[in-house]
Amino acid sequence: MITKNLKSILSNDNPYILFDGKKLTEKLEINKEEKEEFKSFWNELEVDSYMSDKGKYRKRRIAFFNYNRLLNKLDVIQDKKSFTQSYEINKFVGDLERVFSPSSNEFKNSPLLKNLIEKMVSHLPIENDSIQVNVHQIRILSSAESLGLPTPEGIHRDGHKFVSQHLISKNNILGGISGLYKLDKNPITHKMLNDFLDTIVLNDEKLMHDVSPVFSADENLPSYRDMLIIDYNF
């Protein structure tokens, strides 16, 4: 089980926080029906066509928001469609403007998503009232023919101020261990995310991360790992 780190606010001395998903679900007062509805949004994802290894094991959608902390208001950025990371940050698909299918309106308007973002922002050392938030829905598939690679780029940064990583669901999957590293790639900790909303929050300017490959426990059954990745910039 994941336990929360000693300090609850990110800082220079505390560049990551771990949240137990069951406790976070209780704090956000998420009932069973809301949880299952939220998980179902990952059944709507489309194959990521930008994989430089030609893999078909990653599916995703994306949404862009402005979050006003004073008003506790989450507004969709309607005119933003593409997502780009520098080659220095992402040697797998860096310097490539990627246009993914937008997340559904039901997902973008989900009270659970808004409450989760509000909760995460409360643990970030941000003084700005306006925060740009990128929300990535990602499903990694595995099969008898191929492993699923949650981070095909290896140990890396995402190129943002802060990032929160939330497990949504996993089915018939082994592997998928999340790792955190210093900027020289020396390991800090490794954790297996098991339950809905098991969460890692990190200072992306001070840490690197990766996830080990995932593979099917039973090759005759559907195998996937669903993640919600949220970027915070200002």
Image (spheres, grey):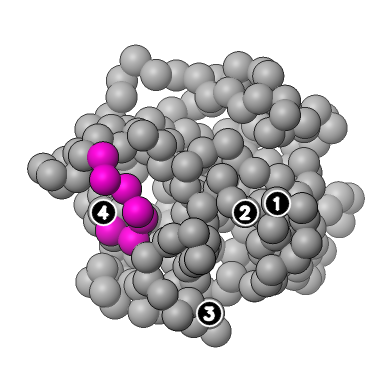
**x%, y% of residue 115?**
25, 56
Q: Residue 183 carries which label?
A: 1
Main secondary structure type of the part rendered in magenta: loop
Question: Quarter-wise, where is residue 220 in the image?
Answer: bottom right
Amino acid type, callout 4? Glu
Identify which residue is drawn at 77% across, 31% down: 91
CA–CA distance between discs 1 and 4? 28 Å
The residue that mark 3 highlights is 2
The residue that mark 4 highlights is 118
Q: Is mark 3 on a helix, strand or loop?
A: loop
- For label 2, the crowd category at 10 Å Cα-Cα, with few meaning under 14, some 14 to 19 and many 20 or more, is many
Amino acid type, callout 1? Leu
Amino acid type, callout 3? Ile
CA–CA distance between discs 1 and 2? 6 Å
Label 4 vs label 2, nearer the camera: 2
The residue that mark 2 highlights is 207
Residues rendered magenta in the picture: 122-128
Q: Disc 4 or 2, which lies upstream in sequence?
A: 4
Whether the residues at callouts 4 and 2 have beta carbons within 8 Å, the answer is no
Q: What element carries label 4?
A: helix
Whether the residues at callouts 3 and 1 have beta carbons within 8 Å, the answer is no
Label 1 vs label 4, nearer the camera: 1
Q: Which of 80 and 103 is in front in this view?
A: 80
